[in-house]
Image (cartoon, coloured by chain):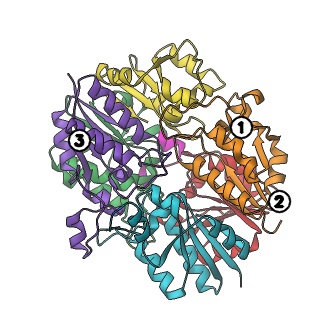
Chain colours: A green, B red, C cyan, D orange, E yellow, F purple
């Protein structure tokens, strides 16, 4: 546990720069061989919607960025089930096979980490 | 008669709740940016608002976020129609 | 024809709002309306920083404003106090702190908040982003 | 009504720069002889607490700034009663004699303005 | 056992609500910056939290905001004690 | 003695968090702890902008960081991509865009995100502001 990293995403995509720079950080952590877990919590579950279609030139499609996390050795992707329910999002709408966590499992999973960052 | 522009998520900010406190008959609400996520409210809050106020949604911002089917009580508009709305109403409030 | 003052108080990169303002402004101009001024205040002043360097696949809003301003002879007014606090200075500000470097340049103009009052009084509508 | 200005404050003081720059703007508007109303709504009611004592050098006491608004000809200061109640703030804790508005009066008052800014 | 640092107002952000979803036995919560306004919750929410978790408040941030009398279920601390808390707990989460 | 990495993701002027980080850092140093690095990422990079000009009665956090860094030989690491996007560039970045002006200078250092990993691995604690 000593150096395991948890990135807790809680921001919706596009409205702010949180999602982009948080995912950049996750990819670098993966590339550097860190033990990293990425959580999608609260409004960050909107980052996982498959059907995103950015209408502005120069704005990256975040669902594609998230799908590419695996190529940077970021394998532990967790989604808060409660956050999805509150926002009426179905499992079939997500862009990746993420692990859905109940509230108790979410707590237990986050608590295993000693470096926790929130975006 | 202001046009209320909601640009933040209702789950993450008090924008929608604060806007609701200042609504009067004849007002309209336009959802843009992360305000688009007001459509994800489970409690059919928007449908209730639509009974008394005109609701608009900025179409490119909705498509960016993966929402392309709009409920029939909101009108999807583009930037030119956004400009027209700000002219039609005497004032705007950006929440 | 309607005349507008656009007030931009959101940061250039960290919020979508400045980009919304740009699209709104472009649409208004296309429809033949007049933009009396675009006033950058609060975090909106970061739109005027000409040191902004972006990856080739990212938007450079600073450049977009410049092009639009040149095409339509727009006034891009930046509140001087709000800019200075956020590390955005003109050549004249630079002289006062004994440096020769600066990052706020034409067509952006450093002005006082009074200009916002003047512009609002001359316009039919104010829209904040 | 054509050129009357409403500034709606809704941010708590100190945590962000909204309050400072909004009050700067109100003072300039007053100095320029504009017809201006300043509203304290939501978390902005915290700006009005009399007993503020900034513990950081270089951070202005906002209650003093608000008290000085009158010297810049900013006379219409309105406070949302509901926002105060929700935050358990008593009238006696405020730094100025502001006009308390019920929700209906707040709506009616804001609607009189054609230039509305939110901070 | 993380130390949860709440720095946003509970009326303006989901920080307190989100933090509560991740609390486990033994955790502590520290209120700083606009998180100080969690003390203004009318529904005695903090008092309930205090039954299971240690609650701390950063004293200079409270005084800045005009709060100098603290309820007895929160412990007022200074920056040095803030540093000590981050050492005592194996991790911290800044909400 | 405990060693810390401090991660600053909030803006210098627009949020209190950078100031909280400064006070936390000062207190940790007074208590004899070690600060492996202060890493500025996301909006936190604005702390490194040396064009920040403040009224005499305002805090200048940029100067406070500089003094603290000099006194304790601290490492002030700034993520280069996050800085560039927000109009904060080093002399070398300036050369690449054909200008001679820049606003990111010693003791602040422009680095990649990998430095954050290295610092976290070397530290006992990470605290985000």
Name the mark on residue F70.
3
Between the residue at mark 3 and the residue at mark 2, the CA separation in whole angstroms equals: 55 Å
Quadrant of the rendered image containing residue D49: top right
**Residue B66 vs residue D113, the one in the foreground:** D113
Front residue of this view, candidates C113 and E16: C113
Residues in magenta, as a range? A83-94
- Look at mark 2 in the image and give the residue it sits on: D112
Of residues E19 and A46, the one nearer the viewer is E19
- Sequence-first tag of 2 and 1: 1
- Residue at image point 35% right, 21% down: E85
Residue A91 among magenta residues: yes
Q: CA distance from mark 2 to mark 1?
A: 21 Å
Task: Locate residue A33, reporting x and y percent.
Answer: 14, 44
A92 sits to left or right of B58: left
Tag shown at residue D83 = 1
Can residue D56 be seen from the camera position used here? yes
């Amino acid at each position: 546990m000593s150096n395991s990293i948890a990135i807790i995403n809680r921001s919706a995509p596009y409205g702010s720069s949180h999602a982009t720079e948080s995912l950049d950080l996750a990819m670098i952590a993966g590339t550097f061989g860190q033990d990293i877990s990425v959580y999608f919590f609260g409004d960050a579950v909107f980052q996982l919607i498959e059907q995103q279609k950015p209408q502005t030139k120069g704005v990256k499609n975040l669902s594609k960025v998230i799908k590419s996390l695996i190529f940077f050795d970021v394998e532990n992707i967790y989604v808060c089930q409660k956050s999805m329910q509150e926002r009426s999002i179905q499992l079939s709408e997500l862009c990746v096979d993420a692990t859905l966590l109940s509230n108790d499992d979410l707590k237990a999973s986050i608590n295993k980490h000693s470096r926790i960052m929130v975006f | 008669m202001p046009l209320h522009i909601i640009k933040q998520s209702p789950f993450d900010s008090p924008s929608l709740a604060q806007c609701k406190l200042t609504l009067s008959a004849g007002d309209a609400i336009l959802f843009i940016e992360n305000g688009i996520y007001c459509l994800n409210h489970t409690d059919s809050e928007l449908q209730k608002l639509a009974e008394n106020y005109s609701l608009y949604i900025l179409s490119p911002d909705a498509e960016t976020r993966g929402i392309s089917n709009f409920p029939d009580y909101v009108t999807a508009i583009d930037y030119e129609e956004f400009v027209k709305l700000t002219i039609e109403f005497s004032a705007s409030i950006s929440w | 024809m309607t005349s507008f003052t656009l007030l931009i108080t959101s940061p250039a990169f960290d919020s979508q709002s400045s980009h919304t303002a740009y699209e709104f402004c472009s649409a208004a101009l296309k429809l033949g309306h007049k933009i009396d001024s675009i006033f950058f205040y609060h975090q909106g002043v970061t739109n005027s920083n000409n040191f902004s360097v972006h990856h080739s696949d990212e938007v450079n809003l600073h450049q977009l404003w410049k092009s639009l301003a040149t095409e339509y002879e727009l006034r891009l007014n930046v509140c001087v106090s709000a800019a200075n606090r956020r590390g955005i200075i003109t050549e004249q500000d630079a002289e006062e702190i004994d440096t020769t470097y600066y990052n706020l340049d034409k067509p952006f103009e450093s002005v006082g908040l009074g200009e916002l009052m003047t512009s609002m009084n001359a316009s039919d509508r104010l829209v904040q982003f």
